[in-house]
Amino acid sequence: MANNVNFVISFDKINNKAKELLNSLYDRIRTDGEHSWFFDIFVDGKILTYEAASQYSWSNQNIGPKWCYLEEWDDERIVGTSAWSAPDIGLKKLLGILEKEDPNIVTSISYEDEVPDFVGAQLYLGKNLINSKHLEDDDIRKAVIEKLDNLSFEDWDEEEFNWKTSEKEDLFQDNVWEITSNIQVDFIDSKINLIHKNFNDTDLSVFSFVFQTDDFEESLNEEGIDNAKKYLRDKYNKLIDELSEVDSDVKLFYFDGEKPIKILNISDAESKILNFNTKEEAQKIFKFSLTNSNTFVFLAIIKGNNHWSSGFLKMSKNTSFSVLGSYPGQKGICVQGYYDGDFDTGIVISPDSGNYLMNDDEKLEWYGIKREILDLDFFK
């Protein structure tokens, strides 16, 4: 028999249009049986029927656990139970629908195994997981022991995998649920507060778009000046056109290693960074890019910092680059790679990995940037 996993999905920030859509999806849930199934939400009667959704293969691919039923639901939260694991795949599927009406919907899920063998919490912005915390059984024991003066690691029998006395077992069981619940609540509250602090869709933010110089150097060395100019001209045109779709008032700069060079339009680009007629002149203009970092660094001042999974992703079709800047729900500078219309490694894909938090200046130098260039004060 599968272990039950209890979960609560909370819609911590959701607009009225998304609420209306959510309630219309709830209308699909059948309430005349023993259980009300999570998969009912996705049944439209045309592409997906109740019978098809009830199959294990569909549930496994689209919900996650082999079964998952709902006990309560409204426009603020969903309470339910699933087998072996939380229904995070189903939640992402639901958020993929809701974000069409509210791209900035903020959602959390807390879950705990019935033993508990594990507990955890996840936080989403749109349909993207931006932070999570997961505790296995040894993490749970450690958390409880740290909170209780009269329980210690010496009270646990690792070989027998149980507490040495029934008194210690009772002490653990009497406290474990409150302690783990507090861990979940504290985690979610802190991350939501950080989103509210860091997230914005109106204030100006600075982002660095970093391209490798390999193709330009190949053109410069093997195909001639005209092809090298064309490469950069095409790169600039694509970048400014697509950034303008993210924010029509975008301001774009080229960073030469010391200062930002503002580029208003292609004519500006021709006079400021494309004004070379020899290989030596090109190498002089792009000395920092070609000899120090092997990257072209463009800086964009954009309204909002909520474009990582939408506008920036769309921009990466038929090209590749890395973006560095402020990411909602995280402190400091973050990085995400993009490749041919898809995510490469980075903060969007791995929000729990410290590898994509640029807290070390050496990490920033690898991309050819300095910390101060991602501050609006740098442009004053």
Image (cartoon, rainbow, N blue to C red):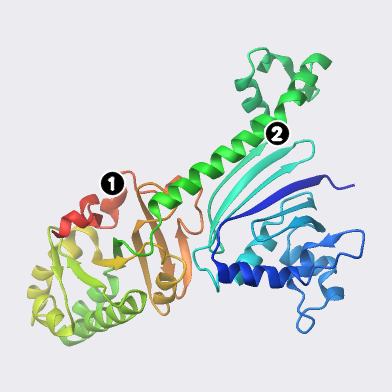
Q: Is residue 51 left or right of residue 64?
A: right
Residue positioned 41% across, 67% down in the render: 307
Residue positioned 64% across, 56% down in the render: 76
* Residue 119, x across and y down, in percent: 68, 40
Label annotation for residue 362: 1
**Circle 2 residues within 10 Å: few <14, some 14–19, many ≥20:** some
Label annotation for residue 137: 2
Chain-order first, disc 2 or disc 1: 2
The three-letter amino acid code for the residue at tag 1 is Glu
Q: How many marks?
A: 2
Residue 311 in view:
yes
Q: Is residue 161 above or below residue 273?
A: above
Q: Is residue 268 left or right of residue 127?
A: left
Identify which residue, 21 or 259, lies in the foreground. 21
Identify which residue, 249 or 138, lies in the foreground. 249
Residue positioned 66% across, 15% down in the render: 152
What quarter of the picture does the C terminus occupy? bottom left
Identify which residue, 13 or 379, lies in the foreground. 13
The three-letter amino acid code for the residue at tag 2 is Asp
Q: Is residue 354 above or below residue 11?
A: above
* Residue 69, x across and y down, in percent: 81, 57
**Circle 1 residues within 10 Å: few <14, some 14–19, many ≥20:** few
